[in-house]
Amino acid sequence: MRTPTTVLAILLTLAAAAPRLHAQSTHVAPQAVLDAAIQQHVDDTAAQRAAVLRVLDRDEVKKVAGRVGIDLTTASTAVAAMQGQELAAAAAQAQQVDKALAGGASTVVISTTTIIIALLVIILLVVAID
């Protein structure tokens, strides 16, 4: 009676271990595809950082930053720490600035929404001071 119990215990142990062994050996995607996806992400992130740093290195941006009192060294360091959506948003804005300045544009176009918001802020400040 002891032999069938031992055999049953061994079979149950093997049956429980088999799915784990199989799961370790197969992947949903091949390793080359995973490596390519990771490399693409790394390349995209590097390109986004480069776009932001390229704009920060422009003379026009340096002049504006100097007038406003922004230290571009600190800004460049902050770009190195950006990731994900924050970096993508900064890169998109940097590309817009780069396009605007590449054509020799020396003026900044302010949208109607920006003017309305600025006027609302001024009105709120006037009301708050009185």
Image: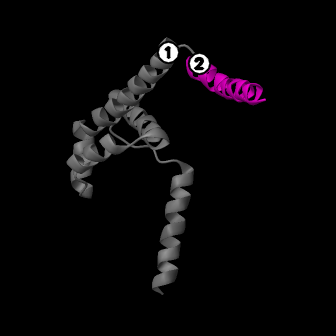
Q: Nearer the viewer, residue 109 or 3?
A: 3
Name which residue lies at 54% across and 67% down.
Answer: 120
Q: Residues within 10 Å of mark 2 (few under 14, many from 20)?
A: few
On screen, residue 56 above or below 129: above
The colour scheme used to paint the residues is one colour
- Dot 2: element: loop
Image x and y of residue 119, in percent: 51, 65
Residue at numbered disc 2: 27
- Give the residues drawn in magenta, as a range: 1-25
- Amino acid type, label 1: Gln
Give the amino acid type for the residue marked by disc 2 in the picture: His
Position of residue 9 measured from the top left corner of the image (x, y, whole percent): 71, 30
Quarter of the image where one finds residue 13: top right
Judge left or right: residue 124 versus residue 55.
Answer: right
Percent across and percent down for residue 114 are 51, 54
Q: Position of residue 61 (x, y in %)?
A: 27, 42
| Magenta stretch: includes residue 124 | no
Q: Residue at label 1? A: 31
Secondary-structure class at tag 1: helix
